[in-house]
Amino acid sequence: MSNDIQYPDHFITRLHSIWGEGFMSPGGPEEVGEIVRDLDLGSKTVLDIGFGTGGPAIELAKKHQAGKVIGIDVEPQLRERALANIEQSGVSDRIDLRIVEPGPLPFADESFDVVFSKDSMAHIEDKQALFLEVKRVLKSGGVFVASDWLSGSGEVAVAALNEFRDVCHLVLPMATAAETENMLLDAGFENTSARDRNEWYAPLCVAEVERIEGPLRDQLINEVGIEIYDHWLKVRTALAKATTVGGLRPTHLRAYKPGSSTM
Ligand SMILES: C[S@@+](CC[C@H](N)C(=O)[O-])C[C@H]1O[C@@H](n2cnc3c(N)ncnc32)[C@H](O)[C@@H]1O
């Protein structure tokens, strides 16, 4: 991805207005819970790829009792906002945040029991290289759990997804579920799964547009100005259409590094 800032303050303000403070992706604490469901994170060391403004890392440490969460992200301005949220969480002693360069993960082999990521990998072009790196830094038997924005297939779905990408400023080199699972298997993971969340998110995404047009309108215009508001409504309307026709498919991924289980 480029080094340009994709998440300026006014964008974060808009995302927090629909998804809650600390969350730059849909679903809040419940969706983090869904991603790690049935896993015991107690005392485990977790890497969070794309910490955003800290909401998911706080959930992993506080509710799911992770022993240590190391978060990485590529946009320096996010760290300050994330740290402010983490300060108030009561678990700041168990969360470390680092700004890194895109590319190889700056950690020794077998550093983590769990690698987690929420809706961040859609930004990463070379997913195969990322998955190899995730496997390298996982302990033997460790687990990779993530939510990612994947692309659907079929003419109508792909056209709607492209319309969204045309109006949205984000760089989103997305893959389908089949492509993603194949890349995970090629990287040497086993017991992979992809759980489609489109059915959950499509109606919610439509409801988000209604909130932006309705109860949130005045507050948003006040905070970011009419021009940014108008453009965002267009982007969000295109996103709602892309999810409704199945072009954009939030998906929960899980994959295990072979070996005796640490989980
Ligand atoms: C949609 S936000 C999600 C943030 C957070 N995970 C959440 O759910 O609230 C995507 C995040 O991925 C980060 N990101 C983009 N490219 C990245 C990379 N190569 N490595 C780590 N983080 C990256 C962005 O800066 C941003 O914080």
Image: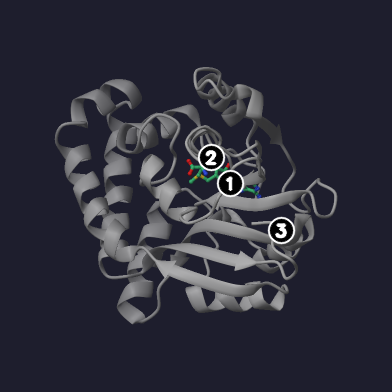
Q: Is label 2 within 8 A of ligand 1 (CB to nearest ligand atom)?
A: no
**Mark 1 or mark 2, which has the lower sequence index?**
1
**Given contact means CB atoms under 8 Å apart, are the residues at marks 1 and 3 in contact?**
no
Identified at 45% across, 31% down, the residue is: 22
Give the secondary structure at mark 3. helix
Is label 1 or label 3 in front? Answer: 1
Residue name at image x 46 percent, y 55 percent: 37
Instruction: Give the structural element (helix, strand or loop) at label 1.
Output: loop
| Cβ–Cβ under 8 Å for marks 1 and 2 | yes
Q: CB at mark 1 closer than 8 A to ligand 1?
A: no
Find residue 197 and name its label. Answer: none
Between 242 and 167, the residue placed more toward the observer is: 242
Q: Which mark is residue 134?
A: 3
Tell me which label, 3 or 2, sits earlier in the chain: 2
Residue count near mark 1 (Cα–Cα under 10 Å), binned few <14, some 14–19, many ≥20: many
Relative image position of residue 148 (x, y in whole percent)? 49, 58
Give the Cα separation between the discs numbered 3 and 2: 18 Å
Q: Disc 1 versus disc 3: distance between alpha carbons? A: 18 Å
Asked if residue 1 shows in the view, the reply is: no
| Mark 1 and mark 2: Cα distance apart in space | 8 Å
Which amino acid lies under the numbered mark 2 shown in the image of this protein? Leu
Residue located beneath label 1 in the image: 41
Amino acid carrying label 3: it is Val
Say the numbered circle drawn on residue 60. 2
In front of the other: label 3 or label 2?
2
How many numbered marks have been drawn onto this rendered protein structure? 3
